[in-house]
Structure formats: structure tokens, C-alpha cells
Amino acid sequence: MLHSPAALHTHDHYLENGEHVVSKDVQYSQVFHWLSQGWQDMARAPGISLFFGVIMAVSVASVYFAFRNEPVMMFKIATFFVMLSPFLATGLYYVAHRLEEGKPVEFFDVITSWRSNLSNIALFALCLGIITAIWARITPLIAAVAVSDGLLIVNPEQGLMSFLTSAQGMEFLTMFMILASLVSLLVFSLSVITIPLMLKDNKIGAISAMILSFEVVMENKGVMALWALVIGALLTLGMVSLGGAMLLIMPLLGYASWHAFNDLIEIDDGYPAINPS
């Protein structure tokens, strides 16, 4: 049900059938309801949920063991996962959508769910890729600031724990976390409803969806800040556990994000059809 007109904020965006997209205010308690709904979806689709969880768990573990003696590279790749996660979760959004409609979930359809709006989902992925590439260039500069005489921090052979307890390592980590949080917040703002919206209607453009996503975040700053913190905390837990916790965290957050989208956005068929042209 739509909010009252006094609480309703509308955007100049219409679907191909003329329906009006309406954003809604949400409450802090709904964040935990999204997680609860995501957990229920995992129980309803355990096989495909485990598939996505295993992929992410193996990826995180592989990065750790491949770069455990190169902490800077390890932290850089860890943020790649965070920044690209809205795209990586596309299949999970699709699963949640199918479960919501009471339709069967087919494995091939899930892993190719991007086909329904290929060009726009690809454009969104490209935007995330550009942000990630820029971040990849920034990380060595942070390392250079931490040790004014080079791009390598301490000794790359020292390992992660020795790195974290060194003065240079702590300086790097502090600067890295501050800047990574700011960049991740930008990605979150541009992506919180973007792919779910494009999956729900294949005529939605990537740029329009990202703009709408940013506006929705601005309208619900407090709740979205909490949601971003929850996502960040769970992803951090997944990485600290060397990927083990990702078995549950990846599908949980993917499904919960779909339910967040549903609570934030509603297609209002009560408005008359309007042709933007």
C-alpha cells in the first residue's frame, strides 16, 4: 500500500506501460525484517543459495591464500568484492523475485538472469568497473603516503598480522578504511535498488535506475546508513572468516536486498499513464 500523499515522494520516471515509480519512506526496524525475509528465501531455495555462497567463499579464501604475504593487494581485492557485489548478486535478486511470485527457480535462468535487460545491466556493471579501476589506482597512492619512500609497505614477505601491527601498516589501514568507506558508500547509493529495478522491468535504463537509487538513499538517509553498516559488517565478517561465513552471508544479503527494494519502491498504477516524450 502506498504512503499518504504527505509522505509520498515521486520521481519523473515512468515504465514502458505508463506506470509511475514511487519511492517510500522506510523504518529502521525494516532492515532486520529484510534479513529475516532473506533467511526465509534461503530456506526455500537452499541449493542455489549454497551455489552462490560457495562461489563467494572460495573466491575470498583464494584471494587470502594467494596474497597473504601482500597485504596491500589483499585489501585492494577485498574492496573489489564490496564494490562489485551489487552486480555479483544479480542472480540472487532473480531468485528472490521468482520466489516472491511463486514461480519455479531454474538454475540456467538464474545464472543468465542478466539477459532480460542485458545492455543496461552491462552498462551498470561497466560503471562499477570504472569506479573499481579508479580505486585500484588510488590504493598504491595510499601506500605511498604511509611510507614516503616507496609504494611497498614494510616488507611484503612479513605476512598479514605483522603488517597490521606495524606503524606503517596501521597508518595505511586507517587511511585505506576511511577512503574505502567513502567510495563504497557512493557505490551503495548508486546501486541499492538499481539491478532489482532493471530486473523487474527490462525497459528501465541503467542511468535512470542509478539516479533513482541515489534519490531513494537521500530520502531515507538514516535507514540506508544502517542498512549500509549492516551490509559492511556482514561482508567484513565474511572476509575475516576467510570466506567461511560467506556461505550464508552472500545469499542472505542478496535476498534481503531484493526485499529492501520492494519496501523502497512501488509501481503506482493509481496514477494516469503519462508519456514522458
Image: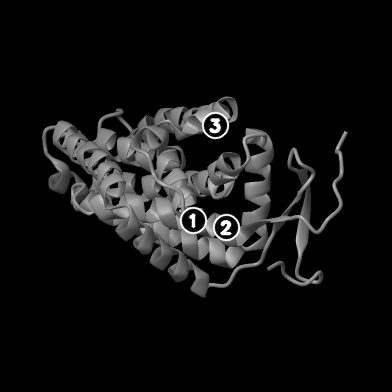
Q: Are marks 2 and 1 in contact (CB under 8 Å)?
A: yes
User: Mark 2 to mark 3: distance in Å?
Assistant: 19 Å
Q: From this viewpoint, is residue 259 visible? A: yes
User: Mark 3 to mark 1: distance in Å?
Assistant: 18 Å
Lower sequence index among marks 2 and 3: 3
Residue 116's mark?
Answer: 3
Q: Secondary structure at mark 3?
A: helix
Q: Position of residue 240 (x, y in %)?
A: 22, 52
The residue singled out by tag 2 in the image is: 262
Quadrant in which the C terminus appears: top right
Q: Nearer the viewer, mark 2 or mark 3?
A: 3
Q: Nearer the viewer, mark 2 or mark 1?
A: 1
> Foreground residue, 139 or 245?
245
**51 above or below 31?**
above
Q: Position of residue 13 (x, y in %)?
A: 76, 44
Q: Secondary structure at mark 2?
A: helix
**96 above or below 145?**
below
